[in-house]
Amino acid sequence: MKLEAPNSWNDYNQHFLTTMNSPWYKFLVKLQNFITTETMKFYEKKGIITMHLPVTTGSISSPMGRGSDSLPVRINLEGVNTYLADSMQFLLEYGCRLNENGVYYVMPSFRGEKADNRHLCQFYHSEAEIPGTLDDVMNLVDEYIKYLASELLKQFGPELEKNVGDISHIKQIANYEGSFKRITFDEAERVLKEKYPDTINEYIEYNDGWRNITRKGELELLKIYKGLVWVTHYDALAVPFYQAMDDNGRTCKNADLMMGIGETVGCGERHKNYDELMEALKYHEVDSKEYSWYIEMKKRHPIQTAGFGMGVERFLMWVLKCNDIRNLQICLRFNGIDTTPQFDNDYINHKGTVELETERLRLRKIRLDDAEAMYNNWASDNDVTKYLTWPTHSDISVTRNVISSWVESYKNDDYYLWAIEDRATNELIGTIAVVNKDDDKKQFELGMCLCKRYWGKRIALEAGQAVAEYLKSLGYKYFKATTEVGNDKCVRAIQKENLEYEGIEKDGSKKLDGTTSDVYVYKKVL
């Protein structure tokens, strides 16, 4: 059966519990591990090595371009203002000065914008920087994505077909020959204008000196180019200062790979030297103070590099055909919200059925030798069983079988059923039991059978209070009472005890013969 995303992210406590039993998240954690291990294997063959990098930075990489929709996350750490890393591109450029083949990492990135179906506040970033040009890094991305798709089919092929259904999109990439389709931004605009001349503003965002592709525009390009296309050479002011300028002075040497929900990989060629970088900072009107070390690196050790960043969750959205990225987080993180699961750790301390006494009653475990008294006093009485879930016993053998099953259940610490004795006569006059319980909600419901001769003597109240007090000592907090619609005597008895009426539960009473009855529902805080 195809896996469905549980959409549990909007209830932090429920998400924590859902995840542990969810086939979706059990498969997701395998895919996360796959990304990490296969990324390492991919780069190892190329001599590209990983770096251990911090999660804080004094030099953010976004938002720098005016077309960026991301915000930085500023923090104060022991009196020092800094940022949580939005990308480690700058330090990966630094790493290219340490390893001639380039460097990579897979680690969290932090963004200040609110999460939505396309964005996370914290996501995993697969980033790499290599010596070379825009074409070099685009070729590397093509190879990386093809490799991941191919390995996915090898390692998870049958499981993917079972969980996702049609996986032709993965096969398409794994078997893709040559480079992925590449179009310039100008070409993308022309294609969209030809198709939507009167509504082009819905697909291309026009600003003073720069353009950008809208979400709707990304999705339309994916339709046109069958789910995969590079868009290259955006307007310079739409992208960050660190992307190298084209010779035309208008566009940059950058590219976004569209797949799945839209942009999944972003890449670009960097400025090679000090002069190019300083010109770009001035053009973008960026204060160079926070980038002094980066400027000095370009001045002292100029190298032509290019790099990319892939949003891991966006890639996995494409794999799983998921339309909400919030379903791709196992551990929820939303800015400005404490997503730590909060639970009342006063667990129910089950101790089983123990003997209880009241002024008039003794409550104890039922025994096999109680069969005759139970049969004669209530189990064979149609008036007593009228509103019970089980029918009148036809003979004492039925009673013996029922008691035998109850006695067997006493082996369980969470089983609660008492025989009710009249202390004055030692006569067995009924039973009281926990018939429903919800340990997570700390709620229980009692069921009672009582010899007709003892009706109207408030025996049910006395026995019920004793059991409720005992269950309260184990950790239960709420007592739920139900009675069938039409059982007016029971309704009046419950109403005398000031339980809060919650309404009618349709078909709330299910009898052994398969019939159902509506019940009144009452609740009391212990």
Image (spheres, rainbow, N blue to C red):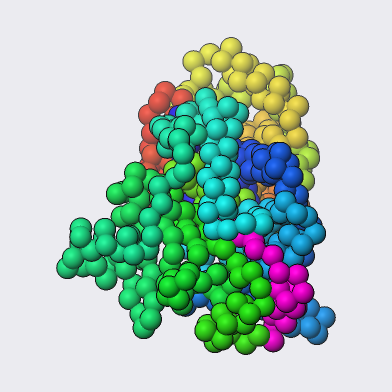
Residue 85 figure quarter: bottom right
Above or below, 186 relative to 65: above
Above or below, 44 relative to 198: above
- Residue 414 position, x and y percent, is 71, 37
- Residue 108 position, x and y percent, is 67, 59
Q: Residue furthest left?
A: 198
- Residue 432 position, x and y percent, is 63, 38
- In this orientation, does residue 489 appear? no
- The reply, left or right, for residue 398 in relation to residue 388 is right
Q: How many marks?
A: 0
Residue 87 figure quarter: bottom right
Q: In the image, which residues are magenta?
A: 289-311
Q: Nearer the viewer, residue 406 or 51?
A: 51
Image quadrant occupied by the C terminus: bottom right
Q: Residue furthest front?
A: 247
Q: Nearer the viewer, residue 509 or 425?
A: 509
